[in-house]
Each structure stands twice: as C-alpha cells, then as structure tokens.
Amino acid sequence: MKSEILEGKAKIKASKGKITRKMPVFYNPDMKLNRDVSVLLLKSIKNNKMKIADPLAASGVRSIRFLLELNKSKVKEVFINDASATAINNVKSNLKLNKLNKSKKVTVANEEANMFLLENRPFDYIDIDPFGTPVGFLDAATKSLSRNAILAVTATDTAALAGTAQKACVRKYWAVPLKNYLMHEFGLRILIRRVQLAAASNEKALIPVFSYSKLHYMRVFFRCGYKTRDVDEILKQHNHISYCTNCLGLNCNCKNKKVVLGPVWIGDLFDAKLAADIYKNNSDDSNNSFLKTIVDESKISTLGFYDTHELSKKLKLQPPKLDALMQKLKKRGFKAARTHLSGNGVKTNASSSVIIELLKKFS
Ligand SMILES: C[S@@+](CC[C@H](N)C(=O)[O-])C[C@H]1O[C@@H](n2cnc3c(N)ncnc32)[C@H](O)[C@@H]1O
C-alpha cells in the first residue's frame, strides 16, 4: 500500500508498512536524519553548481529534498537512478507531485548503479545508500568523483562492522572488528579505511569530514582530493590497535594479553568547523541534541572514549554523573565531551589512570 508522506519540503508517495528490502518501493522514515544530514552538509560546504548523483534512489526522496531545500546556486544537475523499474516509475510520479517533472536540472535513469556512475561521471556529490554493505559500489563511486567532491557512504551491515559477524568484516572490509563498547567507533574507522583503500587504488585521497553511527547504520562523508602525496599520507594513518581487557583501554603498556583489531583509520572522524556549520544550519529541533554532541566531540582528536559504566563495573564502583566527571576533567586542564556513540561515554585527552583516579574519588 502506498501513502503520501511529508519529509522536509518533499511530498512523496511510497510503500508503507514493515521496512524490508522486499517493499515494492523502499522508504524508511527512520532514515530521515540520514537525509537531513545530507541536506545540511550540502548547505554547509562552499561547493556550488554541483552535479549530484543519487545512484540508489528508491523513492527519490533524497534528491527531491536536494532540489527543494538547497539554494538554487548549489545544484547544477541531479541524476536520480535505481535498478528497479518500479522504483523509477515511483520517482517519476514523486517528481510530478513536487512539480519537478519538467525541471531541466533532473535526469532519471534505470540502470545498475556502477554502470550508471561510470557512464555519467564525474560528479561533485555521490550518495551511496544501499541495502547492507556499500563495498560493491566503492570502486565505481571513487572513480567518479571530481576534484573536491563529496562522497557519502551508508553501511547497514553493522553486524559485520561492529564485530558480531567478525569473518564477514574481514571478508568485506579487510579488518578485524571489536565487539565491546567501542564497536561503533571502530566500525566507523574500519568503514573509513575500506573506502579510502578503494579510493587510493583510483588515486583519490578521501578525508572523512563527518562520520556517525546511529540506529542500524553507519554513515561517513568524505572530501575528495587528487594529490597522490595526500593518498600516501592517508595510508600512513591506517593502523592496528590493541585493546586491553584488563585496563579497558587502548594501546596500554600493561602485561595483560591484548585484543588486536583493525587495521583502522586513526585520523579524525570530523571536520570540526563543518560540524559546527551543520549544527548552525539545522532548524529541526529533533536533530539538535545529536548534532550538538557531535560539535562537542569533534573538537577532541582522540582514538576511542571511556565508558564510565563499564569502567565503574570493572572497578566495582558506583558510576559517576557524566557532567560532574567532565567538569572535574576540564578543571584539571583536560578536554572532555560526551560522544554520540554512547550515552555513558566520555571523550577526553586524559589518560585512563586519571579517569580511574577520578572514578574512585567520585565513588
Ligand atoms: C536502501 S534503498 C535506498 C534508499 C534511498 N537512498 C533513500 O534515501 O530513501 C536501496 C535502493 O537501491 C536499489 N538497488 C539495489 N541494488 C542496486 C544496484 N546494483 N543498482 C542500482 N540500484 C540498486 C534498490 O532497488 C533500492 O531502491
């Protein structure tokens, strides 16, 4: 059954009911935030006159929102594609519903996504939003990026990236994942490295500018450079990480046998200025707290964070109030912020011994 749905400024008709890839035309209301962030990011970067690719478009809602919500000078052309003929018929009627069917800026295609990208490249923005893993689209997508373009990648195979399906992660992402409170951060870092490797083989340097994990998916936006020197620098920031189950921390020097994961991207997950601009441009209150948390954590360049509940449990202590702990850390001259990756997490440049000392004092 199709029903009319309002999302942002777009009005679309799409299948409602149980969210499964078998829906005649896929539309997932839970992914509104995913599309909101795409719109906000495109609003917040300097790029203008962009040629945009939506190769896995389903109902076309994302592209329709770009056309309706972005400043006219931002968008030169939007290419909307899906391999499903039913989806593409639906895209056409949704364009009509939004009075965009005669827009000279829109091209609609019904092709396999990789073929579509390679035939119509280059693009200034590509949004890879598949069912499951994005890896099958990475070669064509990274080949099809113009200089300074943005690549957006969604992965919904979080079982692999977050360590439940370790072998699948090794097969698809060429890295060993972690399965504990840090799994979402390291899932993101594994995904980032895998996209960067696909790009490197096409001589493109992809720097993550906004990364997050939410609900059942992980999402990363990259800025594309063309300098081979930058590609080499990126590859230097791929490393294995050791996690200590005794200290519940990363790369510690104690004698306990470590869990080794990765390789992962060890650089920043965000461009802090872009995160601040995205937050500034947001006008939907329901996104505020999520985006503000990212603004705060983007100012701290560290690997991982401390989960105060996990640490307190290990030390047989009462967990502290997060705000009080952060205040104490800041008083001592450390940086501290919440992380969107865990309600009990604190991101800080303080060492685990400082955190443990404070946890004991609080208790
Ligand atoms: C998760 S949905 C996309 C959701 C959409 N981007 C949105 O924001 O609502 C994935 C879509 O990719 C399409 N698809 C799957 N494999 C494809 C391929 N190889 N080439 C083109 N389209 C494909 C499916 O028909 C489906 O509509």
Image: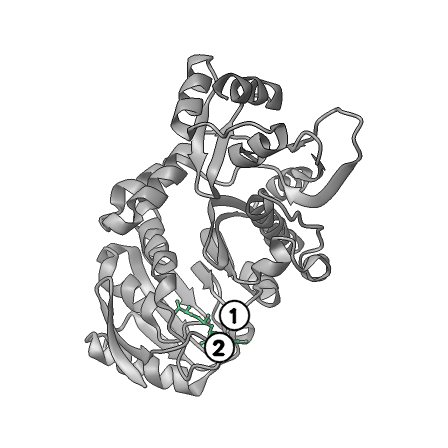
Q: Residue 259: horizontal and vertical position, in percent? A: 74, 40
Q: Which residue is mark 1?
A: 131
Q: Residue 328: horizontal and vertical position, in percent? A: 43, 17
Q: Are marks 2 and 1 in contact (CB under 8 Å)?
A: yes
Report how far apart the C-alphas of labels 2 and 1 lie in the structure.
Answer: 7 Å
Q: Which quadrant does the N terminus fall into?
A: bottom left
155 relative to 2 in the view: left or right: right
Instruction: Point out the residue furthest to the top here.
Output: 332
Residue 8 appears anywhere in the view: yes
Q: Nearer the viewer, residue 214 or 70?
A: 214
Mark 1 lies on a secondary structure that is: loop
Q: Quadrant of residue 164?
A: bottom right
Q: Quadrant of residue 310?
A: top right
Q: Nearer the viewer, residue 65 or 329?
A: 329
Report the amino acid beneath label 1.
Answer: Phe
Q: Which residue is mark 2?
A: 21
